[in-house]
Image (cartoon, rainbow, N blue to C red):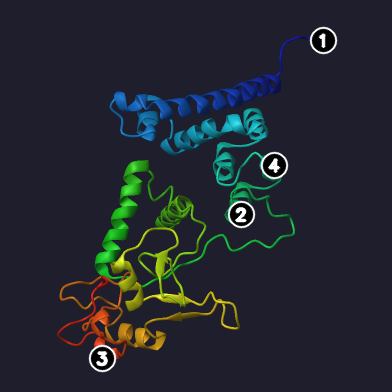
Amino acid sequence: MTTDTPTLHDRLVALATAYHHTELELAELLAAMHHSRDFAAMGYGTLGAYAEKELRLDARKARTLAQVGRKAPDLPAFREAFARGDLSWTQARALMKVLTAEVEVAWVERAREVTVNTLERLVAASHKGQLPPGPTDELPPSRTRLVVGIDAQDLDVVRAAIELVRAQTGLSRDEVDDGAILAEMARHILAMDDSGAAPTGERFRVVLQTCPDCSHTSGVDAQVDETHVGHACCDAEVMDARPGPTQGHLSRTIPPATRRLAFHRDGYCCRVPGCTNRLYLDLHHLAHFAHGGGHDLGRFGDEAEGRVAQRE
């Protein structure tokens, strides 16, 4: 004799299945709420604050679910796995950093095989759109220390920036430490650069080309005037583009040894009284180069007239 009465196990399976589908729907609705910003009209500054008060939902989980809801339509394998409960929201949160349509299947399969902690290490060792490391690949340490020296006033700026991110996102230190926020700030800066060029020590870079025969100088990517040409003659990096054994060689109008000595003498800091700037410093000729000044060290400032953080 059989019975149609569901067992306790059957009821739990059915409820868990419904729960996972509901969690996906919740994620998609939270994404819509984030996009519409209807929570702001209700007086809430962030989606997390709205979720905590109105939905009794942890702010961190709400933000993760909203991110899942935004990306799930473009990631069908990930969406299906999340809807079935094969991926928890913590696994989903980790995968958001690396998933693209090309690699989602491989990452979903890998996530099923490992713990959350291991998955986070795999993600930390990978870039967005990269396939997951294999089981035998050596992973870097999950955490390391970065020790830097910094002026007290600059440290205040860094702390203020971190606190601003916390205020905007609602993230507490228990959720995300300062190092993770600094890393995200760095990723944001890198993401904004679409030039593909490596960063340089100069505050700005204007490329000029000069004819070796007639000395005519023009800009490669922009129009230049006599002021730009004068600046380049004063302090520039020069590449020899002429065919021959020196083609591609670099030199500087100010000898590198002189530059290093001037920076060392001035403590790698602007010499203008009261200025503490240490970024993108330029050498300033006291006797203008265009008026016969030279590049010897004595012409780059003394105790009365130092180097300034701007060109002539």
Q: Where's the C terminus, which quadrant? A: bottom left
- The residue under the point 31% across, 85% down is 262
- Closest to the observer: 177 or 309? 309
Comparing 245 with 22, the one in front is: 245
**Relative side of 182 to 67, left or right:** left
Q: In the image shown, does 292 or 30 lie closer to the viewer?
A: 292
Disc 4 versus disc 2: nearer the observer = 2
Element assignment for label 1: loop
Q: Residues within 10 Å of mark 4 (few under 14, many from 20)?
A: some
The residue that label 3 is drawn on is 298
Mark in the foreground, 1 or 4 = 4
Q: In the rendered structure, which disc, 4 or 2, sits on the residue that comes first in sequence?
A: 4
Judging by the rendered image, the residue that carries numbered circle 1 is 2
Residue type pointed to by label 4? Arg
Q: Is residue 228 left or right of residue 77?
A: left
> Looking at numbered disc 1 in the image, what kind of residue is underneath it?
Thr
Q: Which residue is mark 2?
A: 126
The mark found on residue 275 in the picture is: none
Alpha carbon of mark 3 to alpha carbon of mark 1: how far? 102 Å
Amino acid residing under circle 2 = Ser
Q: Residues within 10 Å of mark 1 (few under 14, many from 20)?
A: few
The location of residue 38, given as percent across then percent down, is: 36, 24
Residue 12 against residue 195 in the figure, above or below? above
The reply to whether callout 4 and callout 3 are in contact (CB within 8 Å) is no
Amino acid type, label 3? Gly
| Residue highlighted by disc 4 | 112
Residue ranking furthest to the right:
1
Q: Position of residue 217 (x, y in %)?
A: 40, 69
Q: Residue at x 71, y 60 (%)?
A: 137
**How far is the residue under mark 2 from the one under mark 1?**
53 Å
Q: Tell me the distance, in whole angstroms, between the alpha carbons under discs 2 and 3.
A: 51 Å
Sequence order check: which comes first, mark 1 or mark 4?
1
